[in-house]
Amino acid sequence: MWKRWCLSVWMGIGALWAEGTAWSQRPPTSTVMLDGRLLRVRWLDGDTFHSVGRPRIKARLEGYNTLENYGPVHRWGTWTAEELDRVNDKASELARSRTWRCETLPEGGGYGRALVRCEGFARALLLRGLAHTYSIRGPADARWNAWQHQAQRKGRGIWAKGVPAYLVTSVHSRNARYRSAYIRLISTRDGSSKKIEHNQRFRTCEWVCREGSCMRYIPYKQRFGSRKASCLR
């Protein structure tokens, strides 16, 4: 019994240590004024945040997209993937720099998330070239596209080394479960998207290029933690 008690104590200490380590690796908190209520949040990147404490909210911001932030997975023009990754970090830094005013929209944001509109923050990102407009149904908001065009003309942020016709924003590979897959592209002119269906199998870390930009294929389970793909380390 004594041995079992000691073992349970040590396991508890180990669990607390692991939890504390994981917590310390999370991004710092900041605040968002959501629907008139001040909410403490963690920004996962420039277009997604989770609340800290109650109420539990996972939010996807509407109207724009930032580049993936789990590693150097984008490139176009003369950018290296590592350079774009460093530029992209500034979107998260801007998100945490102040309290942004946001509102919840009636539509969902996918994957169990709320869809949230933070127009002031979107404007700040787009004018700095730290995001691009994004719409599944036709062109994005004309005003938001105008902010993006201004950043493109001035070569700011991700547009500093040219503007491809489209940005590859997600890459899916055919596998045993899904006989067909797709690649999503976003127009850098008006934010509209197009979906290219295919039946190809991609290797982990393989570059997939379409319409002037490229993105590395990284399965979701290899983006974080101990199973992280070699090209992300």
Image (tube, rainbow, N blue to C red):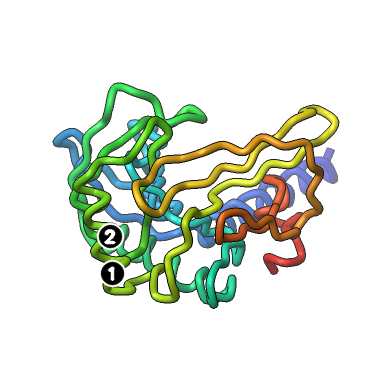
Q: Nearer the viewer, residue 203 or 191?
A: 191
Q: Amino acid at mark 1?
A: Arg
Name the image quarter holding the N terminus. Answer: top right
> In terms of image quadrants, where is residue 149?
bottom left
Q: Residue furthest left?
A: 36
Residue 55 percent across, percent down from the top left: 33, 31
| Placement of 134 over or under 20, stated as above or below | above
| Placement of 204 over or under 116, stated as above or below | below
Q: Amino acid at mark 2?
A: His
Residue at 23% across, 57% down: 147
Q: Is residue 175 left or right of residue 34?
A: right
Q: Which mark is residue 153?
A: 1
Q: Nearer the viewer, residue 94 or 4?
A: 94
Secondary element at image label 2? helix
Residue 59 percent across, percent down from the top left: 38, 37
Residue at 61% across, 54% down: 210
| Placement of 227 over or under 111, stated as above or below | below
Residue 185 percent across, percent down from the top left: 53, 46
> In terms of image quadrants, where is residue 215?
bottom right
Q: Is residue 20 left or right of residue 148?
A: right
Secondary element at image label 1? helix
Between the residue at mark 1 and the residue at mark 2, the CA separation in whole angstroms equals 6 Å
- What residue sits right under mark 2 in the picture? 149
Residue at 38% across, 46% down: 191
Name the image quarter holding the C terminus. Answer: bottom right
Q: Which mark is residue 226?
A: none
Label 2 near label 1: C-beta < 8 Å?
yes
